[in-house]
Every structure is written in C-alpha cells, then in structure tokens.
Amino acid sequence: MNDVIRRFLKESIEIELNIGDLYQLFSAKFPQDYNFWWRISIEEMNHAALIESINDIFFTENLLPPDSIEKQTEELRNMNLYIKEHIEKYKTYSPTRPEALKLAYELENSIGEFHFEVIMTAKADSIVMQILQKLNGDDINHAKRLETYMTETGVIL
C-alpha cells in the first residue's frame, strides 16, 4: 500500500479516536448530556474500527477521496493536534455546555468527519462498501444530530 494512503488512513483513524475521547470527556463533564455524548463517543470509536478494517482488510484505493491525499493528510494531522489541545485543556478547565456542543459541531463539520460521512452515505459500488455501510448502520450524520440536540436543549449556534 502506498505510504501516503497509509498515513491518510492513520490520521483518519486517529481523528475518530480523538473525537471519541473528547466526547467521553464531555460525557463526564455534563451529566445532563451523558447519554448523548457517550452514544456518539462510541460511534466515533466504531468509525475508527471501520477505517482500520479498510486499512487492514478491505483496502482499495477507490474508497478514498480523489482529491490530493497528501494535502488532506496534513489537514487531518492539524485537526488531530487541535482536538488533542482541547482534550488537554478541558481536563483542567471545564468548558461551558454551549462551548462543548459548538466545538463538537465544528469538528463534525471538519475535513475528517466530512470524508467519513461521504464514504458512508455514497452509493455503494462494491461489496466492500456495502459491508462497511451496513456495519456503520445509523452511526452517521453527527453534525445534524448535534444541531438537533442543540435546538432541543436551547443552545444556539
């Protein structure tokens, strides 16, 4: 496998795991939102596992976005650093509930999550994609779900 694609997949896996860690932190900091944060945290971990399966078992180059993989890998790396900075900061400083929800919404609209969403909602053109999409099930559309949750809880974007 091409090293550039391997790095892209590594950063993609890491972004899902980092976002999952952040959401687990939010589940502890916001007991009133525990179920919401915990559920999407687990979904992020599942996304990482699915990408890992692409990496280890089902890899085909046509599953990846056609744009510049190197540029996207750098953007993913920067996003991973950004998430890790927030995790460290929030371990000692508790964000407000709106700050947490707004950060999550921002992340769910970021490059890493966008590519995962595109892959999981595209028309499956192979048995591999059908399997991955079936495994992923309804664990998609986190940005929309966050937006709905913010509206339901009175948090304005």
Image (cartoon, rainbow, N blue to C red):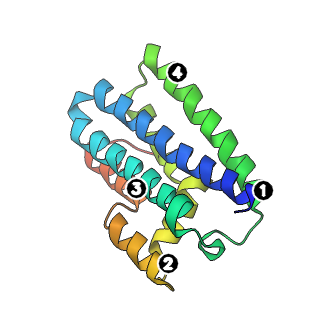
| Residue 70 badge | 1
The residue wearing badge 3 is: 142
Q: Is residue 110 visible?
A: no
Q: Is residue 82 visible?
A: yes
- Report the residue at 40% width, 26% height from top: 96
In x, y percent, where is residue 120?
46, 70
As helix, strand or loop, the secondary structure at mark 1 comes to helix
Mark 1 or mark 2: which comes first in sequence? 1
Which residue is situated farthest in the top direction here?
A: 92
In x, y percent, where is residue 113?
53, 55
* Vertical order, 99 against 79 (above or below): above
How far apart marks 1 and 4 lie (CA) works out to: 27 Å
The residue wearing badge 2 is: 122
How far apart marks 3 and 1 lie (CA) works out to: 26 Å
Q: Residues within 10 Å of mark 2 (few under 14, many from 20)?
A: few
Labels 4 and 2 touching (C-beta < 8 A): no
Mark 2 or mark 3: which comes first in sequence? 2
Amino acid type assigned to the residue bearing label 1 in the image: Glu
* Vertical order, 118 against 4 (above or below): below
Q: Residues within 10 Å of mark 1 (few under 14, many from 20)?
A: few
* Vertical order, 27 against 126 (above or below): above
Q: Please count the marks in the image.
A: 4
Say which quarter of the image contains residue 92.
top left
| Left or right position of 13 against 111 | left
As helix, strand or loop, the secondary structure at mark 4 comes to helix
Give the label, 4 or 3, closer to the camera.
4
The residue wearing badge 4 is: 88
- Report the residue at 44% width, 59% height from top: 50
Amino acid type assigned to the residue bearing label 3 in the image: His
Amino acid type assigned to the residue bearing label 4 in the image: Glu
